[in-house]
Image (cartoon, grey):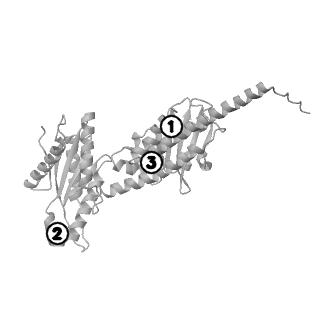
Amino acid sequence: MPLPQPNLSPDGETQKLRQQLRELTAEAIHNELIFKRCHEREVTMLSAEGLPQLLDRLTRGMQISFRTPYVSLVLDDPEHELRHLLANTGNDPDQFKDVKFTDRITDFSPFYTRLSSPWLGPYSKKNHRIFFSGDPKIRSIALLPMIRRGCLVGVLHLGSNNASRFTSEHGSHFIHRLATIGAFCLENAVNLEHLTLSGLTDVLTGLHNRRYLDRRLSEEVTRSARYGSALSCLFIDADHFKSVNDLHGHHAGDHVLREIALRVKECLRASDIATRYGGEEFALLLPQTDQEEAFKLAERIRKRICEQSVLLESGQQLQITASIGVSQLASPASEGCDKKLLNDADSALYEAKQLGRNQVRRAPRD
């Protein structure tokens, strides 16, 4: 039989009510702070101007907003779409140290197979170490599933040194909403990158266009000057291309350009930037490549273009060759050096044409 509770005096009852009020007030302030941080993060994610910026705001930005030392993000990328989009906009996927791209997200961790809402609780080195790089001193974590159209597209992980920071007792409505908006923003960012790239791609060859070259040239010159790395350029021009159009028609000419673009791409490295500069001319930017290395690559491309004839739809075999000019960015970089890099490669190309075509010529070094 339970013992009767002693009646509190009016002063005792008042103290109890005041204590309850203080606790409710503290909880309200805490919830308001969480709401403010989540809302702040939502606004920054929604205003992200592309995939790289969004990834930064989902990781480093989250770390700042929630004052938590450990943040990581795992993204489902079965077709390598995200990684290709980053690479095609000049961003190395590996530069996002807190982001992991996986071919099948449910294989990354057994936790993900049943993760449909946020999970908050104690950190287990055995079960959770895979989520964070290094050997972090984490005591509690929050796993936030990013779900879009009923599919798990990513998981955001927050880690704290405080064991009571993330527990099953905490409400997760705000951060659940945050993860949902993150998934929405990710889809939008991917669509935006595709839209941007479609305006920077040559429809005929599938290579980037001159507009893309102009944008990347500025970026690569700046990077080269900052880190003291070499930057080279190749100009490639199909030999006697006018006669292809005149004798076989423009449809055959288009087929030849597509074949040249394909053979050029077969010789390139992941960091190389290939563009259709105009007509039958192609321009390549080669980051971290000096003129000697660029010359060797140009020779491989020249040989690849001419080693096999092109089969036209008419059944005719057409032998094609190309002339190539090579230049290297002047060091130290100065105003107008980007245009000079292109002009030097173009001049070297002109020299290759004048000397008989189907060869590689280098621009004089300053």
Q: Is residue 125 visible?
A: no
Closer to the camera, 22 or 132? 22
Q: Which SS class for mark 1?
A: strand
Q: Is residue 286 visible?
A: yes
Give the vertical position of 193 relative to 68 (above or below): below
Q: Amino acid at mark 3?
A: Leu
Please give the name of the residue rendered at 60% of the width and 31% of the height, measured from the top-left corner. 139
Q: Amino acid at mark 2?
A: Asn
Q: Quadrant of residue 341?
A: top left
Q: Which comes before the other along the chain, label 3 or label 1?
A: 3
Please give the name of the residue rendered at 19% of the width and 54% of the height, measured from the top-left corner. 236
Q: In the rendered view, does 128 fall on the left or right side of 60?
A: right
Q: Where is residue 15 drawn, in percent x and y?
A: 73, 26
Please give the name of the residue rendered at 61% of the width and 47% of the height, measured from the top-left corner. 117
Q: Which comes before the other along the chain, label 1 or label 2?
A: 1
Q: In the rendered view, does 52 fall on the left or right side of 169?
A: left
Q: Which SS class for mark 2?
A: helix
* Separation of residues labelled 3 and 1 (CA atoms): 19 Å
Q: Which residue is mark 2?
A: 245
Q: Which SS class for mark 3?
A: helix
Please give the name of the residue rendered at 7% of the width and 54% of the height, measured from the top-left corner. 354
The furthest residue to the left: 354
What is the crowding at mark 1: few (fewer than 14 residues within 10 Å), some, or many (at least 20)? many
Q: Which residue is mark 3?
A: 46
Q: In the rendered view, does 253 fall on the left or right side of 354?
A: right
Closer to the camera, 127 or 17? 17
Q: Which comes before the other along the chain, label 2 or label 3?
A: 3
Circle nearer the viewer, 2 or 3: 3
Q: Where is residue 269 drawn, in percent x and y?
A: 31, 48
Q: Which residue is mark 1?
A: 71
Quarter of the image where the N terminus is located:
top right
- Dots 2, 3 in contact, CB < 8 A: no
